[in-house]
Image (tube, rainbow, N blue to C red):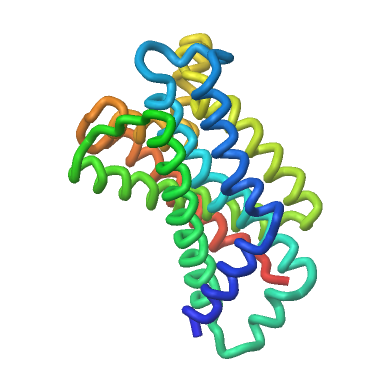
Amino acid sequence: MVLAQASFELRGMLRNGEQLLLTMIIPVLLLVLFSSTSLVDVGPGERVDFLAPGVLALAVMSTAFTGQAIATGFERRYGALKRLGATPLPRGGLITAKTLAVLAVEVVQTALILAVALALGWSPHGGAGGALAVLALVLAGTAAFSGFGLLMAGTLRAEATLGAANLVYLLLLVLGGVVFPLTEFPSGMASALELLPIAALAEGLRDVLQQGAGPPVGALVTLGAWAVAGLGLAARFFKWE
């Protein structure tokens, strides 16, 4: 039953034009645009080597936070969650199904972004150990963003969720080190921005994929703290009706 619901959730996400815009089209356009032009100074080295990890982080946020918050908010408004609550599918099963659908979309968007980045000349580092570190970062980032996405969807009206989720998306796109290096901000502001989940995910991915560093413990700890806070608050305050 959980797998059937996950399949339903996945089909709904892939058929939704707005979801595809957020999860696939915008990240790919940003990657191509900023890799092919010098609109932003991304420091020494190939531009795509800096941008690809940041765009991967943006893709995780767009699916686990923005897309999930908006979709769940409107499901709650139209009573879909209430009706699901009357079925044999338990609430834990519904959350598991939504999580599986998010992870499946992330696999698709990651494959797409990797293909585009490689076509643009991306040279990732890290090897097999790096791949495991990347997986750990993506899972931690997914947990963090999912928690806050469900918290927003379960506490705000659907229209407010739509506006707030898109606003947060734009703010974190600009301030989270996705396409603009955090070093471009004043030092005190940059230190604070490093604590944002999108910045921790983007910088952690860069440490591994651009620098070939080992597991980024600091980024994982930051994302873990956000995940605990987000999921804990969602479990406490989420309203299904």
Residue shown at 31%/27% (left/top)?
Answer: 210
Tally of numbered tags: 0
Q: Is residue 229 visible?
A: no
When the figure is inspected, residue 115 is found, relative to residue 86, above or below; the finding is: above
Residue 179 as seen in the image, left or right of residue 206: right
Residue 128 visible (yes or no) = yes
- Front-most of 13 and 93? 13
Determine the residue positioned at 49% across, 64% down: 99
Judged from this view, the residue extending furthest toward the bottom is: 88
Relative to 21, residue 200 above or below: above
Where does residue 15 sit, x and y in percent of width and height? 66, 63
Where residue 152 sits: x, y (%)? 65, 52
Determine whether 10 is above or below 105 in the image.
below
Q: Quadrant of the C terminus?
A: bottom right
Image location (x, y in percent) of residue 115? 42, 43
Q: Could you tell me residue 113's position as x and y percent? A: 46, 42
Residue at position x 52%, y 44% in the image: 59
